[in-house]
Amino acid sequence: MPNLIVDLDKLEHNIQFIKAFCAANQLEWVGVVKGCESSVPVIELFQRSGVTSLGIASLVTAREQQRHFREKPMLVAIPSALEAQAVVTSCGSSLNSELETIKALAEAAEREGVTHEVLLMIEVGDLREGVMPEDAVRTVRKILELGSKHLELSGIGANLACCSGVLPSSENVSLLNGLAEEIEKSLGHPMKKVSIGGSVMLDWMETHSLPPRLNQLRIGEAILLGTIPGVEKKHKELLDSAFLLSGTVLEIKTKPSVPMGEVGTDAFGVKPQFEDKGLRKRALVNLGAIHTAPRSLQPVPSNVRFINSNSNYSVYDVTDCPQEFRPGDTMEFRLSYSSLIQGLLSPYVKKSYRGASASL
């Protein structure tokens, strides 16, 4: 069985860097733990670090892990109105963009006798969730007209470099800042939190200053993997090996680099392309689509090249690798965000923990 190895000491290094970074910039920080939500050691490590809030995407996990949360987490995946009861029961706050959903949250919170915090998401260009900027004041007015004592509209938020890969700019970041001021001026309702999401903000903030109203950073990938989405690079102060996936080499054979016979589609309906490189040494590894996203894995050994995968296996060209692999050997991989999430959620992948923090 493939093994996902979590080095909690390396993860803590990344957490502490982000904590210090946010403190230096006077930012609250939300540790987004998508995929790691079911990992009690990871959740507890974040909470020991003093994270302002945990950001989760799964209501199922929120319910199952409720006893492990010191405070109710933030739901960073916008919910539907049908999920309102589950949201207010398991989460202290949530990101939202639809008035009907917010109304349902207010009603559910009243039934539960709790106050639920809402951030209204604003579309600043990435074209995922969020009301258009020109509709922001009108939407806030309608939320306030609900008159619910059980719903707190604490501010506004936005997301970057996730759906469409839109990078931060002075224009889109300042747009959020300006809307917070416009809402307060027009409606007299304080925007206590102005939240920006995306690890890409770390890279942008190396050469830019945030506008004064932005006071919360939602961040996940950089903490978990040490990488910056959107610009596809490792952050110089973060470790990129807190998570490693290991597979077992099942077969080593020298074979032609081009299939023998007429080629149709592969297991996933794709017609693969091949380059004739003659005879090559190939390693068959027990990592497939039921375990992770094989194509986005990065082999730790040098000069190992991904060829193809199916549900259970991946094939790698190891001809030029200085390491001599044999059947039964372990091959380790660094992970992308997609391969990490799939690996963490797969029941066919063992999870192991290393480091001093693992014994706490």
Image (cartoon, grey):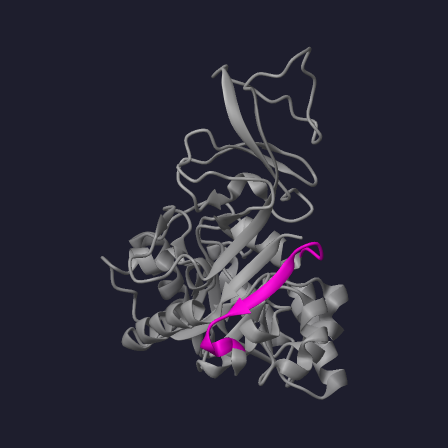
So how many labels did they put on this image? 0
Q: Residue at x 72, y 71 (%)?
A: 84
Residue 32, given in percent of the width and then of the height, sits at 51, 66
Q: Is residue 146 magenta?
A: no
Quarter of the image for residue 238 reads bottom left
Q: Residue at x 36, y 46 (%)?
A: 231
Q: Eyeballing the image, is 131 above or below 353?
A: above
**Along the line of sight, which residue is nearer the eye, 252 or 149?**
252
**Along the line of sight, which residue is nearer the eye, 30 or 156?**
30
Q: Is residue 148 visible?
A: no
Q: Eyeballing the image, is 22 above or below 346?
A: below
Q: Eyeballing the image, is 334 above or below 309?
A: below
Residue 236, given in percent of the width and then of the height, sits at 29, 57
Q: Residue at x 47, y 44 (%)?
A: 298
Farthest residue to the left: give it: 207
Q: Residue at x 38, y 70 (%)?
A: 13
**Along the line of sight, which residue is nearer the eye, 150 or 138?**
150
Left or right of residue 253: residue 213: left
Quarter of the image for residue 110 reads bottom right
Left or right of residue 271: residue 237: left
Farthest residue to the bottom: give it: 113
Residue 48, given in percent of the width and then of the height, sits at 48, 83
Residue 69, given in percent of the width and then of the height, sits at 61, 81
Q: Is residue 317 visible?
A: yes
Residue stretch in magenta = 346-358
